[in-house]
Structures are given as C-alpha cells and as structure tokens.
Image (tube, rainbow, N blue to C red):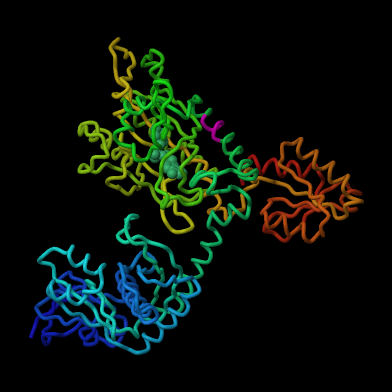
Amino acid sequence: MIQITFPDDSKKKYKEGITIEEIAGDISPGLKKASVAGYVNDALYDLNRPIIEDATIQIITKNDKAAFEVLNHSTAHLLAQAVKRLYPDATFGVGPAIDEGFYYDINTESVIKEEDLEEIEKMMHRIAEEQTEMTRKELSKEAALNLFEDDKYKQELINDLPEDETISVYSQGEFTDLCRGGHIGYTHKIRHFKLLSIAGAYWRGDSDRDQLQRIYGTSWFTKKGLKKHLKVLEERKERDHRKLGKELKIFHLDKDAGQGLAIWLPNGYAVRKQLEDYVYKLEKKAGYKHISTPALGTKKLYEISGHWDHYRENMFPIMERDDETFVLRPMSCPHHMIVYRSELRSYRDLPIRYAEIVTQHRYEASGALSGLERVRAMTLTDAHLFVRKDQIKEEVLAAYNLILQAITDLKLEIEYVELALRDKDKGKFHDNDKLWDMAETTLKELLDEENIDYTPMTGEAAFYGPKIDIQVRTAMGHVITMSTVQLDFLLPERFDLTYIGSDGEKHRPVVIHRGLISTWERLMSILLEQYKGAFPTWLAPVQLKIIPVNLELHSDYAKKLNDQFIDEDFRSELDLREEKLGYKIRDAQTNKIPYQLVVGDNEIDANKVTYRKYGKKKQTTVSVDEFIAMVKQEIKDKT
Ligand code: TSB
Ligand code: ZN
C-alpha cells in the first residue's frame, strides 16, 4: 500500500500502482469524469500513469489551465499518429502545446497542403474512435536510441538529454513517440479539435537546418469551447491589419521594393498626415521643440553611443565614400545628443525636450517581419529629454501622461504596462552596475508611487537603460510595444554632456528617451486592428463621399457641396463614376467612409444634405450649415 496526501492535507492509503483517474473515481464519479491528469509530488502525471510510492497529489480537472495544455499536447500525438498513417515516410520534430492549441513539426517527402488538413483530421477522429490507451514506458538511453534508430531528429534529441535523465516514450496503438508526458490517457478523450494551418519551420529554429512542415491545431474539452474559439479566430482574421490594409489601400509591400520596407498609399498617407499634425500640436503644448536630423551618420557616431557594440546586429552594414564610413541610423538618440552638445547649457535651460518624427532603419530578421507591425524602415514619434537629476521623476511622469493622453485621444486599448529591466548575465547591456541600479530603482519607485500596475520583464531593457513600455495586444493575439519611456544615464556620459549648475560647476544631465505612439508603421497596424478598419472621422482617409442620384441632374449640386466641404478642410470626395447608385453606396460602405451623402431633387430644392453614418441604417436630412457644424465638432472631439 502507498499513502496519498491530498491538497487539504488529508491522507488515504491505496494499492501501489493506483492512477490519478482511479483516485478521482474513488472520490466521486463526477471528479473522475472531469479529471485530465495530475501532479504527483509536483511532477506532471498522465491520467493513467501508475503511482508507485507515497505521494502528495493534485488532480487536474478540465477547468484548470494545465488541463488545456495536457489535452493539446495529447492531441499533438494524435495528429502525429494520423500523419504517420497517411504519410508513412514521415518523421517528426517537436510537437508541443502552445498558448491556444498545439503544433507538430513534420518531415516528409510529400508537400502537405492546406486542403490535406481535412483528411488528416478525419484520420485523427478515426484513431480516437479506436479507443486506444496512451501508455508510458521508461527506457535507458541506449534502448531509446535503438528504438528510434531510423529517426535522426529523435536521435539528436535523445543525445542532447543529460545522462541521468529518465527517458520516456508514449505509445498509442502502432505509434510510439519520445515524450516527457502529461497525457490524457486515452485517445477517445480527444474529441473536439481542429487543424488550423500549415507553415514552414526549421528544425530547432535554425535556418541552416532542415525545413519541416508545421501543422497547427487547437483542441477543446467541449464542442461549444471549440466553436467559440473558432469564432474568435475568424474575427481575428477579419481584424488582421494585413488584410484590412490591403482592402482599404493603406499600404503596400513588394518584394522588389524590399522586405519590410512598406509603401504608404494615398489612404494611408492621409491618416499619417493627420496623426503627424496631431502629435506636433500635442508636443508643442507640452513644451517640446521639434528638430530634424539626417538618416545617415558616421560609424564613429554609433561607436561613441555604444550602438556599434551593443546594437550592431540590428543595423544595416556600413557604406564607404571618400574617407568617411557611414551607417543608416537605427535610432535618433546619437544625433539628439549632438544637438544638446552643440551649445553651452545652464541648469536654468533644463529640461530640454527635443522631439523628432524620425525615419530609422533596423535590420529585423526576415522571419520576424509582419505587415506593418514589424518593419525595417520605420518612422518613430520620438523625443529625447535632457533633465537634471531632480527633474527625472517629474519629467518621466509627464512623458508617461502625455502618452496616456495620446492613447486616450486615439481610443486605443492598453494590454498592460511593462517595466523592461536588464539581464545581468547578458552581454547586450552596458556594464556599469551603479548606473543600472540607479535607473532601475528610479523607475520602480516612480511606478510604485504613482500606483501604476506593471509587469517586470528581465532582459527586455534597451542596452542603455530600463524602459517603461506600454503594451497592446494584436489581432493575432500576441503582445507588442506601442509607447515607451526610457531612462538613460549612459549616453550623457558617452557624449560627455554637461550643464553649468547653480554652483557654477559642470554637471551631467540625464536623458529620457520617449516613443509617443510608436512608429507610424506599427501604430497603423494597431489602429487598423483596434478600429477594425473603420477610422474615426478625424482620421479617416476620406471623410465624406458625395453620391448624386442622377449624374445628369444632380452632379452640379454635388460638386458645389464638395467644393464647400473642401474649403472647410474636410476630406471630401465625389463619386461621379458611370455606375449604379446601389454599387456606389456599397462601395462607400466597403471603404468604411464615415459619411455618405446621397443628393437628389429633394436635397437640391431645400438646399440640404441627406447623410448616413458608416455602420448605421438611419438617414438624416439637415441643412448644409448644420451638417458642416456637426462634422466639425466631431473632428474636434475626435469621436
Ligand atoms: C524611444 N531610442 C529609443 C527612442 O528614443 C528607441 O528607439 N526605442 S525602441 O527601440 O524601443 O523603439 C521605439 C519604438 O519603436 C518601440 O517602442 C516600438 O513601438 C517601435 N518599433 C521598434 N521596432 C520596430 C519595428 N521593427 N517596426 C515597427 N516599429 C518598431
Ligand atoms: Zn532614443
């Protein structure tokens, strides 16, 4: 007999070899049904793995987060078994559970296509119905190497395991896989799943090694759960900025122009122009001065700043002309340091806030590029603030609040605030412990004092200092940085920046780097996704579309209105195409234009307009003056 201790510290004796499933059944039939796996002395155990010694256990049931992982990991095995039946030459890389499902990497001579997923899915259901048990076996390293003698990937994985590691394999029917475990015990417990997509993936993420085919899927405990998730995925696809950006003609990417080098189309540019005007005004009011600096700098400039040592792999290679060596700037900070250094500064001049809407270039790995979200040429709403030590907190906070103001005006949703810290063991950060401690402590204190909730993230800092990053969630479900405030004691030293204090002595200022609302590229990806492509009137590329009912009879009035609206600085357009009225109305809707004005006899006779707002059914007739006043107010209020 063995003694089992439960989470509430109660104890009970069972026969040796009892399983989580049997213990759950002993407590209640309901618990047996809900049980998925368990923790046995903190190790994850399959539902059906025998427990052979005294243990503290915790039963994992369907509602636990770990249960979803166990189910999805088990479903990955089921997928591999089905693939092996359909493609007998297949061998497998890794097949883990991930956030919202699972994947498995497959190597086969056949090219698996999106259309093939249905057949694989059918085979998975068939195997599930065979009701086989998923059993665990532990092996010596030698036996494991023998078992997988024809499988180079498993050989490599086994050889990489530490000598004293227990090697386990799992079998279900004819299929055996190397696996640490944590399974649901029986294939028929896997019922509500869907294969979602297939993509290329390198063995061990290394682009010099085999390219495998990765099948993604998701698996749920209930039909309803699966259905709900598929709906979320469908909505996400509709919201994906790459899809919307193309449909709404916001931006264009072309291999010949270069990967990650986005081209802004007229509609995209119109939005960007509004944002630029908005940021300029906002910063003016907050005491920023605007400057403009070149996209090229000497290599020496980035050697001084430290970018050359700590940021080089993100930079494009050097260019040489005459006896100068240049690089494309990856950031604007070095230039801004030079601007500060160009004059003698007194303590009375500080804080100095230099803002620049700055185009910069970064070498991002091609696999990391994604629409406008991560690009190689980007224009940042940037600023560098030069402050005295006694001004740090006030200025960081003011910069943070200005960011919140912009986010509120844009009606964007924040996921969370992150405090990005350095990782002491990594070489990519400058190595002055004293400066790091000072900068990190200052930001922590400030966030605590202001009761700002934050998630600390080790290793995510900039090489020159810690950052407060404002994170948003993309349509595809991952989290990216939008805005940032960064504290830097390093660059002032590197550039030997000084000001004359009230004591007549030289002192070092501190630099605050600030990204207001990211780069236009990333911001546009966020706006498209959060607005689902429907820009508020103040930002919409085209705000009004005027459609005459009859081209011959009503075009003159339509033109007169259009001129009047343009004089009011509205982005108004006429649709005088030889197309049916219904087609034009639908077209204005497809393009998500905020106001659609159809003009006919009634409007002309009464000198009025009839408008319909995007997404609404109702049509309203008002005088032209009333209409202009209403739209003006809406633009002003940014609603
Ligand atoms: C804020 N020197 C600072 C600046 O003064 C800086 O460059 N910080 S950064 O490296 O964090 O970048 C600022 C912002 O640019 C990020 O917060 C992010 O929103 C945006 N960004 C970074 N890389 C990319 C990229 N590859 N594509 C699009 N936007 C990016
Ligand atoms: Zn900077």
Q: Is residue 580 visible?
A: yes
Residue 562 at what x, y percent from top left? 80, 42
Does residue 271 appear left or right of residue 329 in this picture? right
Magenta region, residue range: 279-283
Residue 384 located left or right of residue 204: right
Q: Quick check: which quadrant has ligand 2? A: top left
Q: Is residue 342 left or right of residue 291?
A: left
The residue closer to the viewer here, 147 or 117, is 147
> At which x and y percent is residue 263?
57, 43
Q: Is 281 part of what is drawn in magenta? A: yes
**Overall secondary structure of the magenta stretch?**
helix
Q: Which quadrant of the figure has residue 150? A: bottom left
Q: Position of residue 126 (x, y in %)?
A: 40, 86
Residue in view at x 16 percent, y 85 percent: 18
Camera-nearest residue between 351 and 367: 367
Residue plotted at (60% across, 53% down):
246
Q: Determine the image quadrant of residue 148.
A: bottom left
Residue 484 appearing in the image: no
Q: Is residue 239 above or below residue 109?
A: above
The reply to whether the magenta stretch includes residue 348 is no
Q: Does residue 335 appear to the left or right of 503 in the view shown?
A: right
Give percent across and percent down for residue 371.
50, 51
